[in-house]
Amino acid sequence: MSDEARRLYNEKLSKMLSRFEEAIRNFEKAIVLEPSDPEPHYELGKLYLLKADKKKTEDWNKKSNVPKSIGVD
């Protein structure tokens, strides 16, 4: 991979990760505003699943009270 291609690739990854972390922060803010709403809890579980953080995925699935949780066997 050329240096320029690697730079562009790394720049794209950096932007994606930044948006990912921003999404986590936004769902956490939504939970503070509406703690009884299960949707942001569930969405956080999905985000942590994508991050391969099984513990946080399980925790947020439990908090969402969604009958069938995602990504946890």
Image (cartoon, rainbow, N blue to C red):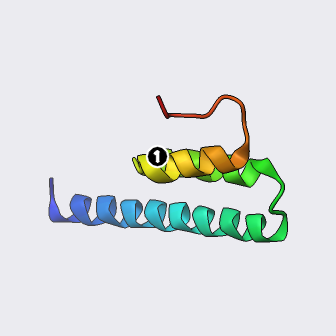
- In this rendering, is residue 26 above or below 71? below
Residue 40 horizontal/vertical position (percent): 72, 54
Looking at numbered disc 1 in the image, what kind of residue is underneath it? Leu
Q: Is 55 on the left-hand or right-hand side of 67?
A: left
**Residue at horizontal 61%, vertical 62%?**
23
Return the residue nearer the eye: 47 or 20.
Answer: 47
Residue 53 horizontal/vertical position (percent): 42, 51
**Residue at horizontal 48%, vertical 45%?**
49
- In this rendering, is residue 15 above or below 56? below
Residue 35 horizontal/vertical position (percent): 80, 62
Q: Which residue is mark 1?
A: 50
- In this rendering, is residue 43 above or below 12? above
- Badge 1: residue crowd in 10 Å (few <14, some 14–19, many ≥20): few
Helix, strand or loop at label 1? It is helix
How many numbered marks appear?
A: 1
**Residue at horizontal 71%, vertical 30%?**
67
Return the residue nearer the eye: 18 or 61.
Answer: 61
- In this rendering, is residue 68 above or below 17? above
**Residue at horizontal 47%, vertical 60%?**
16
Residue 9 horizontal/vertical position (percent): 31, 58
